[in-house]
């Protein structure tokens, strides 16, 4: 792995570190990514963006739950990989550390991250369509429980951002405030195509942060980065962590 002297220095001096992750960070855990690899997900003949849509929640909530329970079942058999584990360790390694994830798979939390900002929600939470109360679900309980809101009896839906929906209130604002104020920003395993999450590296760089990408493929961000590490997150992050330990 080719890591520049500049990145080694930045890593050892950094006080405020921010990381944005996408589906690629979970690829080595066996979770399929959205783009690339030629595998457009289809559920009962319905394309991914149709079954995972706000329209389907309104028109056929039980079908949406069947699909999400199926995905929860697949995820229950996946385990966090070294990239998740190291990012969880980094929470206590820097003066300030912020993990922002676009992933709903819950693997960062399962690896020990206490405070990820989940800008697209979590597959392990449900939300009442009436009063918005959220309920944490046991990752291993399939089908989901409970079925109705314990406060108002309303229908529950997965607490994730579906196609055609806005991000949860406050999540992006919190993430962008951290991006504005960090000195080192990592963008890991995301195609950097889906906004507004893809704005975060741009915000960080425009405020003077050193921007590092970890991805085996080029993205629209690659040329914009101060350093681009081409490879798998589960292989590159352990290498960076060793460097960090050497400077502890
Ligand atoms: P994508 O599927 O668009 O991109 C995954 C990225 O991970 C690609 O750039 C791959 O090259 C990279 N990758 C693959 N294996 C990797 C590995 N082992 N290590 C590091 N990188 C690897 O996924 P996202 O960018 O996360 O939104 O997609 C963003 C959003 O699009 C998702 O959160 C989802 C979707 O619409 C919602 O569901 C709201």
Image: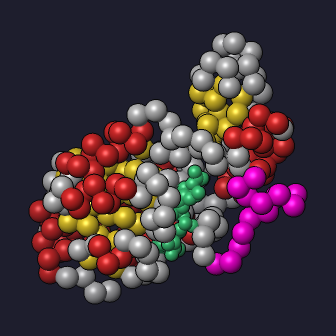
Q: Is residue 81 above or below residue 142?
A: below
Residue 138 or residue 16, whichever sits in front: 16
The stretch of residues the image draws in magenta is 37-50
Measuring 23% from the left and 74% from the top, which residue is drawn there? 226
Q: Residue furthest right?
A: 44
Q: Is residue 96 above or below residue 62?
A: below
Q: Is residue 90 magenta?
A: no
The colour mode here is secondary structure
Q: Residue furthest bottom?
A: 2
x%, y% of residue 40?
A: 72, 69
Q: Is residue 192 above or below residue 130?
A: below
x%, y% of residue 36?
A: 60, 76
Quarter containing the N terminus: bottom left
x%, y% of residue 207?
A: 18, 55
Quarter containing the C terminus: bottom left
Measuring 75% from the left and 24% from the top, which residue is drawn there? 155
Q: Is residue 168 left or right of residue 124?
A: left
Residue 234 or residue 206, whichever sits in front: 206
Q: Is residue 86 left or right of residue 132?
A: left
Total tally of numbered discs in the picture: 0
Measuring 55% from the left and 71% from the top, which residue is drawn there? 28
Q: Is residue 175 left or right of residue 9?
A: right
x%, y% of residue 69?
A: 76, 46
Measuring 21% from the left and 52% from the top, which residue is drawn there? 182
Q: Is residue 73 left or right of residue 85?
A: right
């Amino acid at each position: 792995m080719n890591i520049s002297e500049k990145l080694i220095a930045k890593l050892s001096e950094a006080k405020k570190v921010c990381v944005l992750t996408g589906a690629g960070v979970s690829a080595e855990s066996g979770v399929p990514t959205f783009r690339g690899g030629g595998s457009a997900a289809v559920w009962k003949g319905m394309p991914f963006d149709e079954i995972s849509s706000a329209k389907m929640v309104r028109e056929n909530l039980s079908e949406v739950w069947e699909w999400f329970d199926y995905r929860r079942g697949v995820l229950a058999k996946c385990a966090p990989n070294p990239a998740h584990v190291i990012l969880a360790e980094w929470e206590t390694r820097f003066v300030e550390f912020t993990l922002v994830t676009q992933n709903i798979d819950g693997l960062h939390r399962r690896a020990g991250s206490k405070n990820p900002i989940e800008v697209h929600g979590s597959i392990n939470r449900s939300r009442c369509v009436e009063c918005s109360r959220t309920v944490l679900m046991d990752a291993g309980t399939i089908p989901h429980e409970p079925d109705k809101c314990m406060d108002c009896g309303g229908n529950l839906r997965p607490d994730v951002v579906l196609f055609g929906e806005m991000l949860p209130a406050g999540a992006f604002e919190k993430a962008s405030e951290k991006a504005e104020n960090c000195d080192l920003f990592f963008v890991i395993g995301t195609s950097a195509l889906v906004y507004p999450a893809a704005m975060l590296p741009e915000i960080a760089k425009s405020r003077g942060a050193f921007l590092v990408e970890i991805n085996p493929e080029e993205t629209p961000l690659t040329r914009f980065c101060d350093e681009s590490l081409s490879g798998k997150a589960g292989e590159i992050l352990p290498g960076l962590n060793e460097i960090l330990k050497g400077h502890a």
